[in-house]
Image (spheres, rainbow, N blue to C red):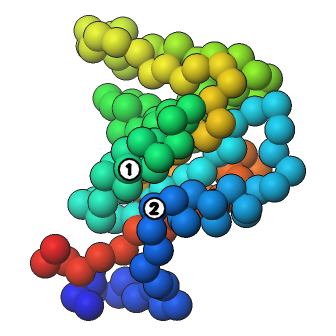
Amino acid sequence: MRLHPGETEAVGWRVVAVREAVRQLRDASPGVCGRPRVIAIDGRGGAGKTTLAERLRKVVSDSAVVHTDDIAWNHAYFDWSAVLVENILQPLYRGEAVDFRPDAWITHGRRGSITVPAGADVLWIEGTGVIREELAPWLDASVWMQGDLGE
């Protein structure tokens, strides 16, 4: 596999059906109740994070996807974890719905909002850098995406 210089190749992986991947991710967090399971999908740009998140969302009908690109849009490349925790994760942990417009969206006139319904079974958070130490207490499971540079 062709990787970026210095990138370590992931080993021990195997191909599984999407439904099996969902089962394994749910099994990784058996004690979750009263809030969605929060599952992070991380990897380099172009690795397929968004595509996987959407496939997983379709399999788990009562789930939602949050894209870190939306949190970080016109904010900061990596300094967005506090915004994610305060405005997305804390309300979900309290059992509340999320309807969040980041400050940068308002400032720059971007329409819409980031929404997650109350009672969602799973929240898929996808984006480069989402698997990080300060978010670890909020994540129930994680997926690392890696692929050949040519694909």
Rendered-image quadrant of the N terminus: bottom left
Residue 128: give its label.
none
Q: Residue 119 in the image: x percent, y percent? A: 68, 24
Question: Looking at the picture, does residue 128 appear above or below residue 138?
Answer: below
Q: Amino acid at mark 1?
A: Arg
Q: Is residue 140 visible?
A: yes
For mark 1, does the 10 Å Cα neighbourhood hold few (<14), some (14 to 19), or many (20 or more) residues? few
Q: Nearer the viewer, residue 20 or 131?
A: 20
Q: Residue at x 73, y 62 (%)?
A: 27
Residue 55: give its label.
1
Question: Looking at the picture, does residue 61 appear above or below residue 103?
Answer: below
Mark 1 residue element = helix
Residue 97 falls left or right of residue 15: right
Q: Residue at x 45, y 61 (%)?
A: 18
Q: Which residue is mark 2?
A: 18
Q: Residue at x 24, y 60 (%)?
A: 46
Q: Is residue 91 visible?
A: no
Q: Residue 87 in the image: x percent, y percent? A: 61, 23
Q: How many marks?
A: 2
Q: Earlier in the sequence, mark 1 or mark 2?
A: 2
Spot the residue most to the right.
Answer: 31
Q: Nearer the viewer, residue 51 or 108?
A: 51
Mark 2 residue element = helix
For mark 2, does the 10 Å Cα neighbourhood hold few (<14), some (14 to 19), or many (20 or more) residues? some
Question: Looking at the picture, does residue 5 appear above or below residue 28?
Answer: below
* Labelled pair 1, 2 in contact (Cβ < 8 Å): yes
